[in-house]
């Protein structure tokens, strides 16, 4: 005890040199404190240590894992708050799992989703087959004709008319309604059905009707309305303690449908018991209940037993005859199209068809023959007539065709004649007319005549010059030698101008003759109208003679010059009279380009 006391907190050695402590009032309190430390000191130290350990203790995952399963079970038995709290976490985890490992998730849900998909597809195909069979059974009967007339008069599609008359029953809509509040919890409708304006409004009306029947006919007895009719529809209700299911049915439903409706309502009560009890107006927890309602949606059409009457074979003969007629029509049209294509190729210049056949598959043609290299491609010929088949094969051998169209095409290609140039073959003579480029004249001069041509005529050909030569000719035509009034003399400056013009004429002629063409320069002499006719004619000729002499002296050959004294004929126009009189006292140039080819060439 003395050792423990001396080691305990607050224990101090005696400070009086071994003397006894004071036993007064203050001394008695100190003695009690010392006595308490002696008796309770160790336990107080242990309690302080335990408090510090508990305060610093951390809960580890291992500790939570030991008690988490039991905690989840206890909480689930108490209420559903654990599921509500875990729902967002589970949704996020599922989305993340699908995003990261879609194959694993697909493999996990395959045993469930596969049969469901197969069942849905099978039911849809079965309904489609039943509808098609019903339509075909009545397509060529008097009943079918009456149905078509009804469809035409009412504007309703024929398929819906057939379904209307052959329908046994069809559950079009299913409503899940809360029994106490009358609010709509879930709704399902048949595929392709035009939905009502507001399913919640219909739910409220059904609840109101149910309350009216209960209060008016069975007050206090809990009676309910089971069925009522609205036009072609019957509304069938099944009521449970917490909810009711209403089916909207077209036709006469069997008792088995009521059993299915009851089983569905029982499943809803079993699965959504807590949600129905705690319902506060939010229908979100009941979204999955649509799958239970959809089990009640079904369509059953009549499948009458086949009767073999006297004329039962008609229903098979007529469709067969129609199909045979359609196939025969297609075959005849295909054959006519093929024959037309062969005739078109045979009539095409430069193409000779030797053999033509159709393949086993429609639209596959094989054509063999001769084709001139300058003739059109067979595919282009057929495409222009809209007769190009799916596949055109065959072998075409080259040959030289003397057909006029092919000869013309051959000449155009060899001489590089544009489409604006006129080319026509008469006998063995090729007539070229219209605008012809200067370079084409050179090709015509150097190249041999195309096969089938012995002569070429160049009547009415206008040579089209290149841009630089055409610009030079335009500048020469715009040039004028202006004289004084009543004069024909030329001063030194004007003489120098004429010599420069002579150089341009010689350069223009050299460029033209290099391309197998030639020029002819016409000197146009003019006068103003002030003199007499004879005087003006003589003066115009004198002026031409002066210019001609200078041009000849500058190297312009006489064979390339021609004179035309216009005097006052064909006067030049100007804005004012003085300017008009001045420009008409002149000599101007008119340049014509002609080909050096003879009009009739023999090669």
Image: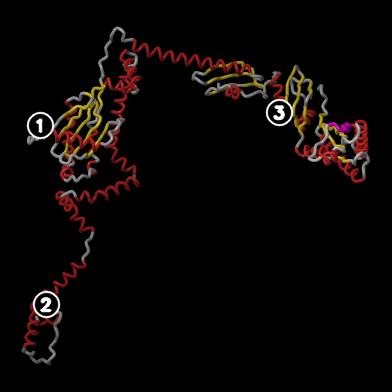
- Residue topped by disc 2: 41
Q: Residue at x 31, y 8 (%)?
A: 311
Q: Is residue 221 above or below residue 20?
A: above
Q: Nearer the viewer, residue 206 or 595?
A: 206
Q: In the image, residue 331 lies at what x, y percent?
A: 48, 15
Task: Say left or right for 218 vs 96.
Answer: left
- Residue topped by disc 3: 420
Q: In the image, residue 57 lies at what x, y percent?
A: 21, 65
Query: Can you tell which quarter of the image residue 597 is in?
Result: top right
Q: Is residue 138 above or below residue 517?
A: above
What is the secondary structure assignment of the residue under circle 1? Answer: helix
Query: Can you tell which quarter of the image residue 195 is in?
Result: top left
- Quadrant where the C terminus sits is top right
As drawn, the residue found furthest toward the top would be 310
Q: Residue at x 15, y 34 (%)?
A: 210
Mark toward the start of the polypeptide (1 vs 2): 2
Front position among marks 1 and 2: 1
Asked whether residue 526 appears in the rendered view, the answer is no
What is the secondary structure assignment of the residue under circle 2? Answer: helix
Q: In the image, residue 226 lies at what x, y percent?
A: 15, 30
Task: Say left or right for 334 vs 217.
Answer: right
Q: How far is disc 1 from disc 2 in space, using C-alphas?
A: 86 Å
Mark toward the start of the polypeptide (1 vs 3): 1
Q: Which residues are magenta?
A: 560-569
- Residue topped by disc 1: 217
* Label 1: few (<14), some (14–19) or many (≥20) C-alpha neighbours in 10 Å: few
Q: Residue at x 25, y 48 (%)?
A: 87
What is the secondary structure assignment of the residue under circle 3? Answer: loop
Labels 1 and 3 touching (C-beta < 8 A) = no
Q: How far is disc 3 from disc 2 in space, using C-alphas?
A: 129 Å
């Amino acid at each position: 005890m003395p050792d423990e006391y001396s080691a305990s907190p607050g224990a101090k050695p005696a400070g009086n040199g071994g003397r006894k402590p004071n036993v007064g009032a203050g001394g008695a309190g100190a003695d009690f404190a010392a006595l308490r430390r002696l008796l309770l000191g160790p336990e107080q130290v242990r309690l302080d240590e335990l408090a510090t350990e508990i305060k610093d203790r951390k809960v580890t995952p291992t500790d939570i894992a030991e008690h988490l399963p039991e905690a989840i079970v206890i909480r689930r038995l108490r209420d559903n708050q654990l599921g509500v709290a875990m729902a967002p976490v589970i949704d996020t985890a599922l989305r993340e799992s699908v995003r990261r490992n879609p194959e694993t998730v697909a493999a996990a849900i395959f045993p469930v989703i596969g049969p469901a998909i197969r069942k849905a597809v099978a039911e849809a195909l079965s309904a489609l087959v039943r509808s098609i069979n019903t339509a075909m059974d009545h397509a060529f009967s008097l009943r079918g004709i009456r149905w078509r007339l009804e469809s035409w008069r009412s504007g309703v599609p024929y398929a819906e008319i057939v379904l209307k008359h052959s329908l046994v029953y069809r559950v079009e809509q299913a409503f899940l309604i809360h029994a106490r509040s009358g609010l709509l919890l879930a709704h399902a409708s048949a595929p392709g059905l035009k939905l009502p304006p507001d399913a919640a409004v219909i739910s409220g009306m059904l609840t109101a009707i149910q309350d009216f029947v209960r209060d008016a006919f069975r007050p206090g007895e809990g009676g309910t309305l089971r069925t009522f009719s609205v036009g072609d529809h019957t509304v069938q209700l099944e009521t449970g303690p917490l909810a009711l299911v209403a089916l909207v049915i077209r036709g006469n439903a069997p008792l088995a449908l009521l059993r299915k409706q009851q089983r569905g309502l029982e499943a809803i009560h079993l699965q959504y018991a807590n949600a129905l009890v705690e319902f506060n107006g939010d229908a979100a927890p009941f979204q999955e209940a649509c799958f239970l309602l959809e089990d009640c949606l079904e369509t059953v059409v009549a499948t009458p037993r086949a009767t073999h009457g006297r004329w039962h074979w008609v229903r098979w003969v007529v469709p067969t005859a129609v199909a045979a007629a359609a196939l025969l029509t297609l075959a005849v049209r295909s054959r006519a199209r093929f024959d037309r294509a062969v005739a078109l190729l045979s009539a095409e210049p430069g193409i000779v068809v030797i053999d033509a056949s159709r393949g086993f598959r429609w639209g596959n043609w094989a054509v063999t023959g001769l084709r001139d290299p300058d003739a059109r491609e067979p595919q282009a010929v057929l495409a222009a007539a809209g007769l190009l088949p799916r596949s055109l094969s065959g072998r075409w051998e080259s040959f030289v065709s003397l057909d006029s169209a092919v000869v013309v095409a051959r000449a155009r290609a060899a001489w590089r004649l544009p489409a604006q140039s006129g080319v026509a073959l008469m006998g063995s003579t090729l007539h070229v007319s219209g605008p012809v480029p200067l370079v084409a004249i050179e090709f015509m001069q150097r190249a041999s005549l195309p096969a089938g041509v012995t002569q070429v005529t160049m009547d009415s050909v206008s040579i089209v010059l290149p841009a630089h030569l055409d610009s030079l000719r335009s500048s020469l035509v715009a040039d004028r030698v202006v004289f004084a009034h009543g004069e024909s003399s030329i001063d030194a400056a004007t003489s120098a101008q004429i010599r420069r013009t002579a150089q341009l004429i010689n350069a223009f002629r050299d460029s033209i003759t290099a391309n197998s063409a030639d020029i002819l320069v016409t000197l146009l002499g003019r006068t103003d109208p002030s003199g007499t006719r004879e005087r003006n004619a003589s003066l115009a000729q004198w002026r031409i003679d002066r210019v001609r002499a200078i041009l000849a002296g500058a190297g312009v050959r006489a064979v390339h010059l021609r004179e035309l004294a216009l005097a006052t004929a064909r006067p030049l126009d100007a804005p004012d009279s003085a300017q008009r009189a001045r420009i008409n006292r002149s000599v101007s140039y008119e340049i014509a380009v002609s080909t050096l080819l003879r009009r009739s060439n023999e090669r």
